[in-house]
């Protein structure tokens, strides 16, 4: 049946039909493959972006908690306050009130003696009450302690209610207080309002495009919601959180989710909070869906054009073939010609099979076709090589993007630390001095509050540019997050680092920043530390520089301070 149908169908029609079927098959396979590939790549890219968002929030939470713990430790260690801890004149309360005015996130600050009786507190709240059974007091009497998020029913009735009517939740920080002889006389406790974490969450989301529809949820170490909808519930399994990325399937739709845990910073050990960043799957795959539709349209268009072109080519090719067949048929009628068996396939082939000599004369045409095929294959090979080269360039561009801070164009933490560790190894082997500068923009939150986040971003960019212009090509500068920068100076001792740091500080102080037509000034504080042979790794040197930065902040800002053993005896002993 098929043989009879082929014998009745012209060759050009068979070629057109077969080419059309192949084109449709290629379009279908290409569309499915491209859709799967685009979906996978879009999912991977969205998960990578969400992971950056989650890490940004986790780093901010760790940074802020570490700074709060460092602040109350420094207050507890202030020698001028030692005579006032046990007095009852009210001067200690004034000191605590001023501290609260400076840091409004502290909802309550109080000092309790060894028996747990509150002797002084901000606003006089809970003065005279016994807090001896509270976890923050019981742990803080022994050592610096940080307690996880909790409700405070007693303070709920004493503090001014939240504007939205939500109950107070706090993170407790406590440190023991010693007298001049080193004897513990009580505990300095702080209730840090958990609304501070929501501010961090909103700031990070505000820095993202609204059309991404991203959301952030913060969980405790047990997976219960601390910040976000459904407080107190455990919406994700331990396996999902351990995997780091998963699909969050809800009644209102499916969302991509990535999870990262806080890791603490410096002396702050961390509370095991887990930050989950979420994005609707439809939003994440919008680009992939559009690309699939475009591929389908282009493929169908190419298939249609190909079918028309092949039909024209087939008609042109079959015309001389028909003429040749007629000529061969005449030659085959010669009694001296040898006959062959009948060959089926099309009317043209059926007549062509009567003459073998005609087929031999067509060998030259077959050789020309072979050369044409070789040229087509060579062109395809060159095209494949060109695609491979473009792919390599794209991979290089992606690597540069992964190692660069998007706002300033400087190195990010991920790219900076391997370079810094290499410099530390070189220092330990050849004893060539290296120094680390920790740079922080003073009162940066005030810049954001008064001039907007766009102005704050411009200040960060220009400060990063000033630092980058001031250092050598062998030195490295990176943005560690927020308004904080770190600089690695090779072949430089503390004296040379001091000269460079003060020059950078003065340049920033003399600069007039003009974001979006506004005029403002900013200053920076710089902490320095020189690498030592006893340092286990570069993090030790960075930690000392960070301590010196805090000393610069405490000394009035817009100054440079270096790490010295007399200023930080406990850290020097630990090192």
Image (cartoon, rainbow, N blue to C red):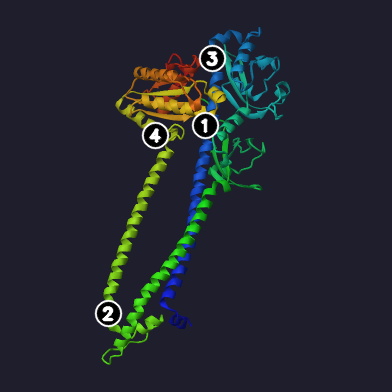
Q: Badge 2 is on which residue?
A: 360
Location of residue 413 in the rendering, given as x and y in whole percent from the top left corner: 44, 33
Percent of width and height locating residue 77: 54, 14
Q: Is residue 482 visible?
A: no
Instruction: Tell me how far mark 4 sits from mark 3, CA to CA.
Output: 36 Å
Q: Marks 3/1: CA distance?
A: 27 Å
Whole-Å distance between the Cαs marked 2 and 1?
Answer: 79 Å
Q: The C terminus appears in which quarter of the rendering?
A: top left
Q: Earlier in the sequence, mark 4 or mark 3?
A: 3
Q: Are marks 2 and 1 in contact (CB under 8 Å)?
A: no
Depth check: give the residue in front, 312 or 427: 312
Per the image, label 2 sits on a secondary structure element best described as helix
* Residue at 44% in and 71% down: 16
Alpha-carbon span between mark 2 and mark 4? 71 Å
Residue located farthest toward the right when viewing the structure as drawn: 157
* Residue at which label 4 appears: 418
The picture quadrant where one finds residue 256 is: top right
Q: Nearer the viewer, residue 485 or 367?
A: 367
Q: Position of residue 286 (x, y in %)?
A: 54, 48
Q: CA distance from mark 3 to mark 2?
A: 104 Å
Q: Which mark is residue 59?
A: 1
Q: Earlier in the sequence, mark 2 or mark 1?
A: 1
């Amino acid at each position: 049946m098929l043989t009879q149908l082929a014998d009745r169908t012209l060759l050009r029609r068979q070629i057109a039909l077969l080419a059309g079927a192949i084109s449709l098959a290629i379009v279908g396979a290409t569309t499915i493959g491209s859709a799967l590939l685009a979906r996978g790549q879009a999912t991977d890219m969205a998960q990578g972006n969400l992971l950056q968002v989650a890490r940004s929030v986790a780093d901010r939470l760790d940074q802020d908690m570490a700074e709060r713990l460092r602040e109350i430790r420094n207050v507890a260690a202030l020698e001028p306050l030692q005579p006032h801890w046990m007095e009852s004149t009210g001067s200690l309360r004034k000191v605590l009130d001023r501290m609260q005015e400076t840091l409004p996130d502290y909802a309550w600050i109080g000092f309790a003696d060894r028996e747990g009786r509150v002797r002084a507190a901000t606003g006089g709240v809970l003065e005279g009450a016994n807090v001896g059974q509270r976890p923050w007091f019981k742990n803080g009497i022994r050592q610096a302690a940080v307690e996880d998020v909790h409700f405070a029913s007693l303070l709920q009735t004493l503090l001014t209610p939240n504007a939205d009517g939500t109950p107070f939740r706090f993170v407790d920080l406590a440190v023991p207080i010693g007298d001049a002889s080193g004897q513990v006389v009580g505990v300095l406790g702080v209730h840090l309002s958990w609304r501070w974490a929501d501010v961090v969450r909103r700031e990070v989301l505000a820095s993202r495009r609204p059309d991404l529809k991203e959301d952030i949820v913060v969980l405790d170490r047990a997976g219960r919601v601390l910040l976000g909808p459904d407080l107190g519930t455990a919406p994700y399994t331990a396996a999902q959180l351990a995997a780091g990325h998963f699909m969050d399937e809800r009644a209102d739709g499916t969302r991509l989710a990535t999870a990262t845990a806080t890791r603490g910073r410096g002396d702050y050990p961390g509370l095991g909070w887990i930050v989950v960043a979420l994005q609707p799957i439809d939003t994440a795959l919008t680009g992939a869906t559009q690309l699939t539709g475009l591929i389908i349209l282009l493929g169908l268009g190419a298939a249609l054009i190909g079918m028309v072109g092949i039909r024209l080519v087939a008609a042109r090719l079959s015309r001389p073939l028909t003429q040749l067949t007629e000529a061969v048929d005449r030659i085959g009628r010669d009694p001296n010609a040898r006959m062959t068996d009948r060959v089926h396939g099309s009317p043209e082939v059926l007549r062509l099979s009567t003459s073998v000599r005609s087929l031999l004369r067509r060998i030259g045409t077959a050789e020309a076709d072979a050369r044409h095929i070789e040229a087509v294959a060579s062109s395809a090979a060159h095209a494949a090589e060109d695609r491979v080269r473009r792919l390599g360039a794209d991979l290089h561009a992606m690597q540069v993007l992964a190692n660069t801070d998007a706002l300033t164009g400087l190195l990010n933490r991920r790219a900076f630390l391997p370079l810094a560790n290499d410099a530390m190894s070189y220092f330990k082997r050849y004893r060539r001095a290296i120094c680390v500068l920790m740079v922080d923009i003073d009162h940066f939150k005030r810049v954001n509050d008064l001039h907007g986040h766009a102005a704050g971003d411009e200040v960060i960019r220009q400060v990063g540019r000033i630092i980058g212009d001031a250092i050598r090509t062998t030195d490295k500068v990176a943005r560690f997050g927020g308004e904080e920068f770190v600089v690695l100076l090779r072949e430089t001792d503390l004296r040379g680092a001091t000269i460079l740091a003060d020059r950078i500080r003065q340049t920033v102080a003399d600069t007039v920043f003009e974001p979006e037509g506004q005029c403002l000034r900013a200053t920076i504080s710089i902490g320095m530390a020189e690498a030592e042979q006893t340092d286990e790794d570069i993090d030790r040197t960075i930690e000392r520089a960070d301590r010196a930065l805090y000393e610069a902040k405490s000394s009035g800002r817009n100054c440079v301070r270096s790490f010295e053993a007399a200023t930080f005896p406990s850290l020097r002993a630990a090192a």
